[in-house]
């Protein structure tokens, strides 16, 4: 199994470390941190077939997706009591206001 390493990509430095999960016997996870980001991430379990290149690719894919999602405007969720309209609701004809009189 490979050991931790550092790499630079897209103006950032990534530090990848291999750490054993607490309370397990031999279950390792890849952790990484990125310059300019206060958090560190453990996004996938280590495998015996891991290479520096494969880990780097997975880290970049995860982090770029995270940066993209954070750049998107927040979506406002509906109220818990309101259900979204169903296709049947949209297809139903509107009531005739004259018929109610």
Image: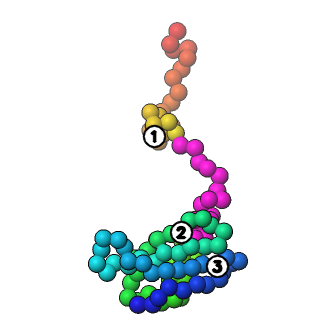
Q: CA distance from mark 3 to mark 2?
A: 13 Å
Q: Name the residue nearer the viewer: 21 or 52.
A: 21
Q: Name the residue nearer the viewer: 42 or 24.
A: 24
SS at mark 2 in the image: strand
Q: Residue at x 61, y 50 (%)?
A: 74
Q: Which residue is mark 3?
A: 13
Residue 20's quadrant in the figure? bottom left
Which mark sits nearer the N-terminus, 2 or 1? 2
Q: Residue farthest to the left?
A: 25
> Where is 94 relative to 20, above or below?
above
Mark 1 touches mark 3? (CB < 8 Å): no
Q: Which residue is mark 2?
A: 40
Which mark sits nearer the N-terminus, 1 or 3? 3
Residue 16 visible in the picture: yes
What segment is highlighted magenta in the picture? Answer: 63-77
Query: On the rendered structure, is 35 left or right of 84?
Result: right
Residue 81 on image: x %, y %:
44, 33
Which mark sits nearer the N-terminus, 3 or 2? 3
Q: Which residue is mark 1?
A: 86
At label 1, counting other C-alpha atoms closer than 10 Å, the crowd grade (few under 14, some 14-19, many 20 or more) is: few
- Residue 44 magenta-drawn? no
């Amino acid at each position: 199994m490979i050991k931790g390493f550092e790499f630079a990509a897209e103006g950032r430095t990534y530090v990848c470390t291999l750490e054993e999960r607490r309370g397990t016997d031999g279950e390792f996870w890849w952790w990484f941190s990125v310059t300019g980001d206060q958090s560190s991430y453990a996004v996938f379990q280590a495998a015996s077939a891991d290479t520096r290149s494969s880990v780097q690719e997975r880290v970049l894919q995860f982090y770029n997706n995270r940066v993209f999602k954070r750049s998107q405007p927040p979506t406002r969720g509906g109220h818990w009591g309101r259900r979204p309209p169903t296709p049947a609701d949209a297809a139903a004809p509107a009531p005739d206001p004259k018929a109610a009189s």
